[in-house]
Image: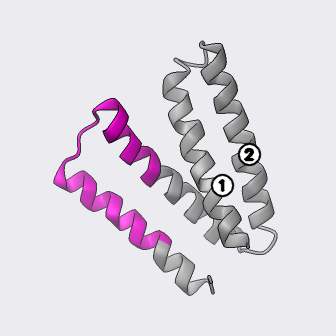
Amino acid sequence: MSWLLLFIAGLFEVAWAIGLEYSDGLSEPLPTLGTVVALIISMVLLAKAVQNLPIGTAYAVWTGIGAVGTAFLGIALFDEPATSARLLFISVIVFGIVGLHFVSGGH
């Protein structure tokens, strides 16, 4: 269950990171509210996950999910470059997340 909470926390990290772009420096009220709500949910779920997972592993996975998700949505939504090198290094993060899951006794 902790890994599922961690995964969902990572998805909410993506949501608040993307929300930062839409909030225009936290000057747009509705996107700012969504960003803050997503950030709170992400943190609460991360806090629940680390009750049963090592903090170093959980934090690395949480930030990795956030980084990968935000990078892909940056490409899809904001026309950020999708170069081969960029995609290669994003895939390295994915391999790191999967590796941490396996060596940490993930189910």
Q: Nearer the viewer, residue 77 or 86?
A: 77
Q: Is residue 98 left or right of residue 81?
A: right
Q: Which residue is mark 1?
A: 9
Judged from the image, the secondary structure of the residue bearing numbered disc 2 is helix
Residue at horizontal 54%, vertical 29%? 20
Q: Which residues are magenta?
A: 68-97
Q: Position of residue 76 (x, y in %)?
A: 33, 39
Q: Which residue is mark 2?
A: 41
Residue at horizontal 60%, vertical 13%? 28
Q: Is residue 70 left or right of residue 13?
A: left
Q: Quadrant of residue 61?
A: bottom right
Q: Are marks 1 and 2 in contact (CB under 8 Å)?
A: yes
**Residue type, label 2:** Ile
Q: Quadrant of the C terminus?
A: bottom right
**Label 2 packing within 10 angstroms: few (<14), some (14-19), many (20+):** some
**Residue type, label 1:** Ala
Residue at horizontal 49%, vertical 70%? 97
Between discs 1 and 2, the one toward the N terminus? 1
Magenta portion: prevailing SS class: helix
Q: Quadrant of residue 48?
A: bottom right
- The alpha-carbon separation of the residues under discs 1 and 2 comes to 7 Å
Q: Is residue 34 left or right of residue 51?
A: left
Q: Position of residue 90 (x, y in %)?
A: 34, 58
